[in-house]
Amino acid sequence: MPNIFNRLRKQESLASSQVPIVDGESPDVSPISRPMSFPAPMNQRQSSRNWGPRAFTYANNMSRRSTSHRRSTLEGGQVPELTKMQPAGLREPWLVFRRSILNSWINILLLVIPVGIASHPAHFPDVAIFVLNFFAIIPLAKILGYATEQMSLHLGDVLGGLINATLGNVVELLVGILALVKGEVEIVQTSLAGSIIANLLLVAGSCFFFGGLKNNEQVFNEHAAQSYGSLLAMAILSTLLPAAYNSLNAKDADLKSGTLTLSHVTAIFLLIIYIAYLFFQLRTHVNLFSAIPLQDRKAAALKPKKVDADEEKNVDSAQAAETAVATTAATPENTASAATSHDQIDVIEESPANNENKATEDEDDEEEIELTLWASVVLLLITVGIIGVCAEFLVSSIDGLTTSWNLSRSFVGIIILAIVGNASEHYSAISVAVKNKMDLALGVAVGSSIQIALFVTPVLCIIGWIIDQPMSLYFSPFTTVVLFVTVLLVNYIIGDGRTNWLEGLVLIISYTIIGVAYFLYPKDMDTSSTSLN
């Protein structure tokens, strides 16, 4: 018996050494070369039959698919149907709730909404009402942006982009309408100016700063930045003209009526410019707003290495050797070797690993539809309704807040209310900026300012015209100067299509200085130059 076992072991080792293994497949081993196995106990035979080779292979494939984050692709680059996320509809309310509410840590502030809504009927102090509804609107703005994005994915590029651009500043629009109905013209004007300043200085500055800390330098589309700069200059022109008109030596009654008429006509033309801008961006000149290629962004993000004296000598000697080689005559052998090395480089660049990385990056950039169209619409309507209630209580408590904290109304509008509408945009823009997607971050920060200046502001001016409220484009001289300097500074920074952390720090400190100036703004000067009653 021992001789038989020894002979079997020798045959098994010989067979295993002769059978080749191709592409990780199991070899075709004869039965005599298989290791001997004894019968398993009765309590283990059932599990052995259940977990055969097919079951183990299927489980291994499923585990491998889950660990690769469902990034496996079929031949031709198509994604398998099993890996695509199915949109959640109205018949799956829990799935809609999970995807829309449980997708960000900011949404923990949703717990404040019931308390904020109940604070006004319960006659809480005005400070408590303002603070509660202030924090309640922040996650609602985040959910509103998510619902708008999901709805735009169903409607195509043109119509989806139009809806996304129009509904991107619903919070500012709702707060402005409610304040305008109550006759709070100054709150409306300062909140609009504060949103523009906060987006251009605080949001864009934070993107440049935090993105520059991780990346050496970040690049973006220079043509898009120049278009943004011209539109912002057009918006500042609409505020400078009423201010210059009011400096004329004329009767007060004529100046007031002329300022309102000039503001109404300018608002109509601003809306025309905004519609033309959307048509230009989404239809005729889409290529001008395309993102910078990934290779250029990575090349700019690389941080320079420190070179010692010895390394400099090695570099100089290497350059001298390359020059000597370049000056020598090209022989057929050298030409053949160069062609071979070039082919090897091409093979390396087109290797499956590089293709997989490229596919992974493209998949990360691709937006996935998570909600159906009607689920997005219902979520949008519910969110807008809740924002309207919270904004109503927020605006009604401003007077008590300014009295209790001894703040000027200009500070509340320029700084505090601006943060409410820009909190979710601030978080989103910084997130994509750190990932070196500066084109998207710039579109969020600067594009939002353009929407407020060319869409929200003229719409509120026209609504004030309809409901007989003296809403005009004539801001206070101090606010007009701040807007002009802000747009001038941002145009200087984004004009070259490159940015770094120092430029972001300049914008953040500029916003801080403006905040201190409005904090010290005299309370008795709030309505001296903005009211046209």
Image: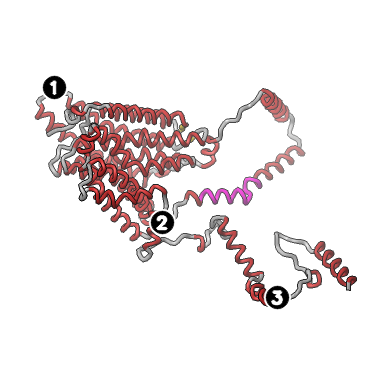
Q: Nearer the viewer, mark 3 or mark 2?
A: 3
Residue 179 in the image, given as x and y percentages of width and height: 20, 42
Residue 433 in the image, given as x and y percentages of width and height: 45, 40
Reading the image, the residue beneath label 2 is 99
Q: What distance separates the C-alpha of mark 3 from that of mark 2?
A: 48 Å
Q: Main secondary structure of the magenta part?
A: helix
Helix, strand or loop at mark 3: loop
Residue stretch rendered in magenta on the structure: 347-362
State the residue at coordinates (16%, 28%). 528
Q: Nearer the viewer, mark 1 or mark 3?
A: 3
* Residue 181 visible to an observer of this rendering: yes
Q: Is residue 275 magenta?
A: no
* Residue 161 visible to an observer of this rendering: no
**Chain-order first, disc 1 or disc 3:** 3
Reading the image, the residue beneath label 1 is 249
State the residue at coordinates (73%, 30%). 325
State the residue at coordinates (77%, 62%). 20
The amino acid type, in three-letter code, at marker 2 is: Arg
Q: Going by the image, does 216 lie left or right of 354?
A: left
362 up-or-down from 41: above or below: above
The amino acid type, in three-letter code, at marker 3 is: Pro
Assess disc 2: are there few (<14), some (14-19) or many (≥20) residues with their C-alpha within 10 Å of its C-alpha. some
Q: Nearer the viewer, mark 2 or mark 1?
A: 2
Observer-nearest residue: 338 or 196? 196
Residue 41 shows which numbered tag?
Answer: 3
Q: Going by the image, does 190 lie left or right of 441?
A: left
Which quadrant of the view contains residue 94?
A: bottom left
